[in-house]
Amino acid sequence: MVDQPSTQVAERVGVPGYPGPFAVGRYAEKLRVRIREFARVCVIGEVTGARVGRGPNVYFELRDADGALPCAMWRNDFDASGLGPDELRDGVEVVAAGHCDFAPGSATSSPRFSFRVEELRLAGEGDLLARLARLRRQLASEGLFEPQKLLPRPALPRRIGVVTAEGSAARRDLLAGLERRGWMGSIVWGYARVQDRRAAPAIAAAIRDVAAVGEVEAIVVTRGGGSIADLWAFCDETLCRTVALTPVPVISAVGHDVDRTLIDDVSAVCCSTPTHAAETVVAIDCARARERLHADVKRIDAAGRAAVVEGARTLAVRSRAPLYHLERHRMRLHQLTREMRAAVRRGRATRAEYQRRIAASVIERKRAATLAAVRDARLAEAAATLERAQEALLERRTEKLRTHGAALRAHDPERTLERGYALLVDDAGQPLTTAAALRDAHTFQARMADGAVRAKTEEDQK
């Protein structure tokens, strides 16, 4: 298959132990010939990355659990197979007959290996789609399609979480859509892988991290389009359960219009593109709303100015009414004012007189009660004073009587009688102090301490 290299080239750049070097073009051409000599075979697998355009070739890949094979088919052969562009879609299992082919490329194009398909027919539903259908039925039976759709979504969120690949086209499309909406809130980014076997756990962790940030009102999960195999991370069961149980509304925008992943079923809203997701998460077109608001402000301002002008005109017309109507109303108002003032004065005088009488009566009663209370207090105080004076006077008089009694008893004739003397008294009880009085009395009594004795005078004339 390989020609012997020239001696000069081998001596100059050869590697010991390896034949060559050979010219790349010659080697690639020989490789192409050898690959095309491989036997024609029939293979079966699932279609991924199907591209049925307007070019001369139809491109797709065939995959199964053990490997993948890039395929190319002439457009004439594809049309002859009887399949339509909508039938050759991702996940469809097909049987392809053909042979291996190799394009050696050139100085300006890359080499390409492919399985050149000559005949193609459908073989039934692919394993990926079957697994996806089973998982979709399982999650639906558990009621995981509804929790996200029951969450309230604000029409104009202040903070949005976005889970996507850093620097991806989906990120740029989403930002452009939000900018066109005129939204000026904040974004919490959760960057994660979006295509490989480690993408699903990374996306789930990013969703949990973004949902844990305070004040995040909605989460957008987005990436560009691709085959079902490329988007298989968004059909992961753990990821779908995480989305279904997230307390923040999750908006999925995975792939393009024709792409449908399992995360679309469990999320609150399924969008076809990142731009559609931007329009969904921010339901209000802020730019247009601002324009409408400015227009409404101008319209209200113009209406207000027009109303003021119209009111001024109406007032001007009405101000030219006949003056006698105004004078009549003015005189009537003046008369009513005078009557009201007189009535007010009379009412105030009447109320003042009534209040004066009431106050006088109340004050008089209060005065009488106060005087009575004062008088009673003074009488009680005077009575107490008199009683104390009486007791003192009585004590003084008693003391004086006691003193006088002692003095009288000191001069009492009875006390003299007690010492052995006798008191002579006439019948009237008058004392007889002289002998002449005794002779004139004839009869008398001699009083002594223990009694009295009657006696008479018998005196000799001599």
Image (cartoon, helix red, strand yellow):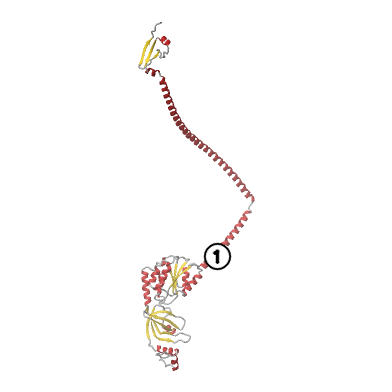
Most extreme residue toward the bottom is 7
Residue 130 location (% of width, % of height): 37, 75
Q: How many marks?
A: 1
Q: Tell me the element at label 1.
A: helix
Relative side of 287 to 133, left or right? right
Quarter-of-image position of residue 406: top left
User: Is 292 in front, or is 84?
Assistant: 292
Q: Quadrant of the C terminus?
A: top left
> Residue shown at 64%/50% (left/top)?
323
> How packed is label 1: few (under 14 Cα within 10 Å), some, or many (20 or more)?
few
Most extreme residue toward the top is 462
Residue 76 location (% of width, % of height): 44, 84
Relative side of 425 to 342, left or right? left
Q: Quadrant of the N terminus?
A: bottom left
Most extreme residue toward the left is 450
Residue 36 location (% of width, % of height): 40, 88
Quarter-of-image position of residue 89: bottom left
Q: Does 393 appear above or below 94?
A: above
User: Is 100 in front, or is 67?
Assistant: 67
* Amino acid, disc 1: His
Residue under pointer 1? 294
Residue 347 location (% of width, % of height): 55, 41
User: Is 164 in front, or is 85?
Assistant: 164
Q: Does 102 appear above or below 185?
A: below
Q: Does 135 appear above or below 97?
A: above
